Image (cartoon, rainbow, N blue to C red):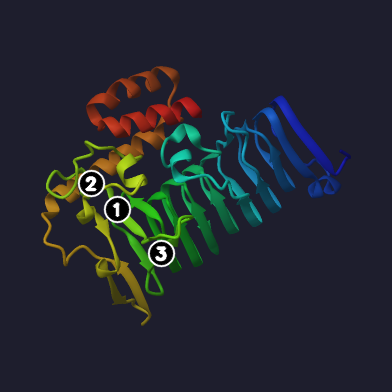
Amino acid sequence: MDKNNIRLTGDIEGSFYPSTQAEIVRNVVLQAPLKLNGGLFAQNITNIGGGSVNGPVLATAEITLSHPQPGSSPLKFLSGINATLSIAITESGKEIQETVVSHTSKASVVVQGDVVSDSVKLDNALIFGNVRSREVSLVNSIIVGSIFAEETLRLENSNFVALSGGRVILKGRNGCWLPYLTSLEPIQFADTILANGETMPAQLRYLSLCRSSQLGCGFKSGGIACEPFVTGKCGYHQVCLGSADIYPDQTEDGRTLYALNLAQRALNLAPIEQEIQQVELFLKQLMMYEHLDKSSQEQARESWAEKLRPEEKELLEMTVAML
C-alpha cells in the first residue's frame, strides 16, 4: 500500500477524512477485523472481510464490496453509504435459503441509513433505510425502507416496504410491507429459469395478507422470513399480488403511471389499515432505537413483546444484536 492506497484495520478512533487536496484521491481497503468509530471519505472503497464503520461513508467514485467468508461477521455501515458512480457487491451465487431473506444473521452487508449512488447493485444485503439511484438491482435482500430508481429497478427474492421506478422488473419470490408500487412502464413479473430447467414465475406477497387468517396462514407457518414461501411451498396464493393488481393512472403532467391497486379485490380493508399502522409502529421502534440512551433502550426492548408481533420482535432483536 502507498499514500494513495490505504488499508484500514483494527479499532480506529475518529473519522478517516482527507486533510489536504492530495488526499481526496485516496483509495481505501476495509480489512477485517475493523471498527472505524467515525466517518469515511475516499475516492474508491473496497473490503476484505467484515467490520463496521460507525459514521457516514462517501466515495467520490465507487464502493465495490465482496462477501465476507461464511460464518464471519458482516460488513456494517451504521450511518448510510453514498458513492458518486456506483455501489456494488459481487454476486454471492447463494441459494435464497442461505441468505438474509431466510435469516437476518446470514447478511453479508448491513446498512443503517440510506444507500445513494448513480448505480446500486447489492446481493444478500440488510438495509434499514431507503435506496435511491438511477438504476437499482437488489437480489436476496431485505430493505426496511423504500426503493427509488429513476430508470430501471430490478428486484429478485427480496422484501421491501415500498418502491417506485421508471421501469420495474420483479423476479423470484418477493414480499412487501406496504402495497405501494409505481412505475412509468408496466411492471414486469419475469420468470426465472431454475438449474433443473423448470420455470419459476415471479411472486410478490403482501405481508398484511399473509397475516390474515382468511387469506393467509396468519404467519403460523413463518413470518417475514417465511420458509414455505422462500422454498416455493406456500399454498396461500391469494396473498400474492400480480399483473392483475396493476392499473394505469394519469399523473398531473399527463404521464401514465402504473401502480398497485387493491381496490378491485373483494377485501375487508379495515384489517389492512390495521396492518399498515402495525408496520408504522414496527418501523418507528426500529429507527428510534439507536438514538436512545441505554436505559431507554432497555425499556423499549421490554415493550416489544406487548407492542409487536413475535416475528417483528424477533427481527428487531436479531438486528439490534448485529448493530
Q: Amino acid at mark 2?
A: Cys
Mark 1, residue position: 205
Q: Secondary structure at mark 2?
A: helix
Q: Residue at x 47, y 31 (%)?
A: 105
Mark 3, residue position: 191
Asked whether the viewer can see residue 87, the reply is yes
Q: Amino acid at mark 3?
A: Asp
Residue 178, label in figure: none
Q: Is residue 90 left or right of residue 287?
A: right
Q: Quadrant of the N terminus?
A: top right
Mark 2, residue position: 210
Which residue lies most toward the front here?
196
Could you tell me residue 224's position as x and y percent? 33, 41
Q: Please tell me whether mark 3 or mark 2 is closer to you in this view.
A: 3
Q: Earlier in the sequence, mark 1 or mark 3?
A: 3
Q: Is residue 220 above or below residue 63?
A: above
Asked whether the viewer can see residue 16, the reply is no
Judge the density around disc 1: few (<14), some (14-19), many (≥20) Cα neighbours within 10 Å.
many
Q: Secondary structure at mark 1?
A: strand
Judge the density around disc 2: few (<14), some (14-19), many (≥20) Cα neighbours within 10 Å.
many
Q: Is residue 177 left or right of residue 127?
A: left
